[in-house]
Image (cartoon, rainbow, N blue to C red):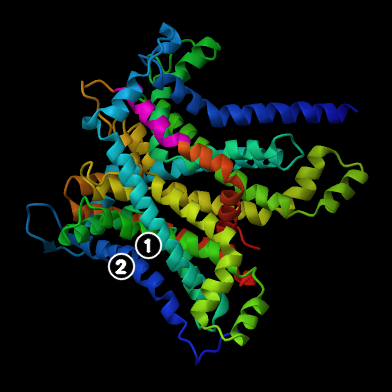
Amino acid sequence: MKEESVKKLLTTLTAVFMIGFAMTPFLYMLFTSVNAKPDFLEAGWLFTLSHYRDVLGADSLHFLDYLKNSILVSAAASLVTVFIASISAFAITRLEMKGKLFVLFFVLAVSMFPQVSMIGYLFKIMTALGLINTYPALIMPYIAWILPLSLWILVSYFSQIPKELDKAAIIDGCNEWQVLFKVLFPVALPGIFSTLLLSFIFAFNEFIFALILTTDFNARTIPVGIALFEGLHGQIPWGQIMAASVVTVFPIMIMTLVFQRHIIGGLTKGAVKG
Amino acid sequence: MSVLSKKEYRPYYFIAPLLVFICLFILLPIVGTLFTSLMRDVTFLPQKFIFLGNYSDLLRDEGFWRSMRFTLFFIAVAVPLEMLLGTAFAALLDMELPMRGFLRACVLIPWAIPSAISAKIWQLIYNYSYGLANFLITHLGLSQGPVNWLGSEGGAFAAIVIADVWKTAPFVTLLVLAGLQAVPHDLRLQAKIDRANFAQIFFRVTLPLIKPVLLVALLFRTIDSLRIFDVIYVLTNGGPGGSTASASLYAYKYFLGGDFGYGSAVSVLLFAVAFGMSCLYVKVSKFESEI
């Protein structure tokens, strides 16, 4: 059938374009990181691993410090966020309470605010508290910033769990904390895992708070570190920047490939309803 | 009736931590910014209440209006592209394909990477003398000579749009894909039996059914583009000649320069626009049914 073959061709072309569009920058990043000079497209290949040696070995570049800061800050922020969001989602889906819709809409509106309208005053608060360039200066705003998304995803997961389940638990004499941790948590575990993953990605990718609230490698996160990366010798050290990017990006890529179902499930639950 | 009765438990305890964090680290900074915008608040100068002084300066500030125009123009170009490309990818992923899961994950990856890092990769791609972009267009014969991507106004604008579409189209894809998969299969089957062709099915049957999802994606992308910062900060830092400074970047530069009063006034105006749009977003996406 003619229409079928046209369709097949179109599908293949779109698929090829899609993969090329999504992946080319990463291939280019990878190739630049293993070439002595960034002009290898014209000048030819000159394979080297020296950029990786610099990035992983030279303490003065502080790459590993940035990475460590990012991982610790994102882990702390996402764990606290998911805990707070779970107990809130529990209350909103399970307890009798006035204003739960207001809370949900309020939180949704908050997540749309431009970050730039907070950074000036946040900087002043953190300066007054003496927290500039420390982990708490990042972790606390991150928690507030990721909470709306986490809450929405978890409310969506929790509301799919049949209420008969906690009714039974109550009859068996559980209090509300036990209902939450012994009944809901185990059932909602995949949802909680998705939320944790997404919260971590959001915290890990955050840029503007980290840019303004940190000053050096003691707290600076990897996105800011790479954006402000300066070489030891003036010229933009593309090889080192790309090596650093590869080391940062590959774990995320693998995580995305392995957990794509969780990520997509959580993301669509957080954004599309009904 | 809810399972747990009101008298026994105090449900507000459960949402208190949520509200405390949001009030302390989002609402308080915003209210603080609002107050600061009414002050002369410059490093090394004594603070002084000047009421709307910063705002009246803003009205006459060509740089501010330029950043607002840039932001709106950027939204007008980038968001439709994201929607188109995102929807096309979603339509593709909705079909029966080999390795569909892998394809889906590939599309997702640009979204999952910190935008500051991907912008750095794009900065190298746009490099005038040895970047991939100029290598491709000159070797494919698309252009006579290399394009000055980041050094010319038009080039910088296009560069930012492409990098941003690359990063955000996956998000649209995921939303639309979720919408597509909720469309009953029978409907499309019925259309096929009625001898509708592929295009007819998509435009007459599927598209109207996923309109709510498209609207949510459109609004979300618009609000998110309104605050664009990371990509521009890394790619052009507002250059050349301030032509690509978004409203967020413009405000940031005043904070950086120590003029908190004026930077706050810029932020407040941006916030007002974003707030109006997020109210619209909340209204459009009807969520109540779920809870």
Q: Is residue A6 left or right of residue B31?
A: right
Residue B267 percent coordinates (x, y): 31, 55
Residue A88, compared with residue B89, is above or below; it is: below
Which region of the structure is painted magenta? Answer: A237-250
**Please, what is the three-letter code of the amino acid marked with disc 1?**
Ala
Looking at the rendering, in which quadrant would you find the N terminus of chain A?
A: top right
Looking at the rendering, in which quadrant would you find the C terminus of chain A?
A: bottom right
Q: Nearer the viewer, residue B27 or A76?
A: A76
- Residue A144 bears which disc, if any? 1
- Residue B24 bears which disc, if any? 2
- Residue A10 bears which disc, if any? none
Q: Is residue A248 magenta?
A: yes
Q: In this view of the protein, can residue A69 be seen by the observer?
A: yes
Residue B201, compared with residue A193, is above or below; it is: above
Task: Tell me whether the residue at label 2 lies in contact with that at label 1, contact meaning CB atoms closer than 8 angstroms.
Answer: yes
Q: Looking at the image, which residue is at 35% across and 40% down?
A: A223
Q: In this view of the protein, can residue B273 be seen by the observer?
A: no
